[in-house]
Image (spheres, helix red, strand yellow):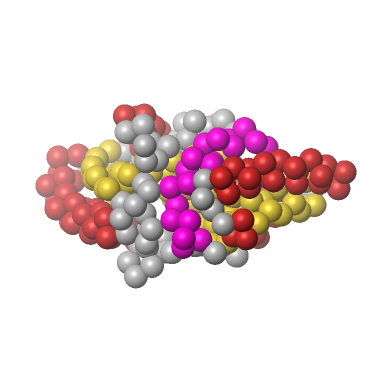
Amino acid sequence: MKPTLLVPVVFPEPAAYPLDDANVVGMDGFDVVLLGYWELPEGVEEETARRTNEAEAQAVLYEMAAQFSRAGASTSVRLDFGRGGAEAAGLQRRIAAETEADAVLVGGNISMWNNVLVPLRDDRHRADLVQFLSGLDSDSIFVLELYHVVADPADADAGEAMLDGVRDRLVEQGFAADDVETTVAVRDDVGAAIAERAERHNLVVLGETGEVDDESRFLGPVYHDLADRASVPVVVLLD
């Protein structure tokens, strides 16, 4: 069964999620759900916004869907109108549950996914990470880096052993051993270390290890900390 990837597209400024059509390839391992959401300004009713903007938004979504389809993904589209904040986050959570989404793709320019960073704080998401990463086109990967940060050098060996276990599972799933790198860094600021490393890659895949602490946000603090510091697209695995 293919992993389902939810891609929120927030209107009226969908250019926040540009697709590089020449480079988006190797998506045949995923089902993609494009979730368009037109955020209503204060004083504007949904019926008015739909009448004025629905055709334009649908055109954008279907062009994005065509790009994902050309990359090999099976793709579906939906469009909703509503207020921002908690209402928008609640809808995203509901759609994620209805579509049984495995992960969410957010932020950054979506280009070729051949240089992937996988930060791991622990092995809680190990099975889900391996399952999702197995959907990537392993033939197009030239670097898949498993990355762990420790504050105490004494913890480095345990971190390396944890990464080696994930690496072994990925190799079993068809990744070339030479393409899967493991790195343990000693840094006090984990978030800064991950953000700096992320800028060397064109995709980050991570498991959310913190509870959502704000009803106006769909994703938890680990993603938002990275998004505040780095500009690459991020896939966040859902529990």
> Between residues 85 and 238, which one lies in front from this camera angle?
238
The quarter of the rendered structure image containing the N terminus is top left
| Residue 38 seen | no
- What residue appears at the point 41 percent right and 60 percent down from the top-left corner? 110
Q: Residue furthest left?
A: 51
Can residue 125 be found in the magenta stretch? yes
| Residue 184 seen | yes
Vertical arrangement, residue 78 with respect to residue 144, above or below: above
Number of marks in the rendered image: 0
- What residue appears at the point 64 percent right and 51 percent down from the top-left corner? 146
> Between residues 95 and 55, which one lies in front from this camera angle?
95
Q: Residue furthest bottom?
A: 22
* Left or right of residue 144: residue 109: left
* Left or right of residue 84: residue 160: right
Residue 139 in picture, x, y percent from top left: 46, 60
Q: Which residues are magenta?
A: 121-141
Residue 134 in picture, x, y percent from top left: 48, 46
Vertical arrangement, residue 146 with respect to residue 3, above or below: below
- What residue appears at the point 14 percent right and 53 percent down from the top-left corner? 55
* Left or right of residue 75: residue 184: right
- What residue appears at the point 31 percent right and 51 percent down from the top-left corner? 73
Residue 163 in picture, x, y percent from top left: 69, 45
Can residue 50 be found in the magenta stretch? no
Vertical arrangement, residue 237 with respect to residue 202, above or below: above
Residue 53 in picture, x, y percent from top left: 17, 52
Q: Quadrant of residue 12?
A: bottom left
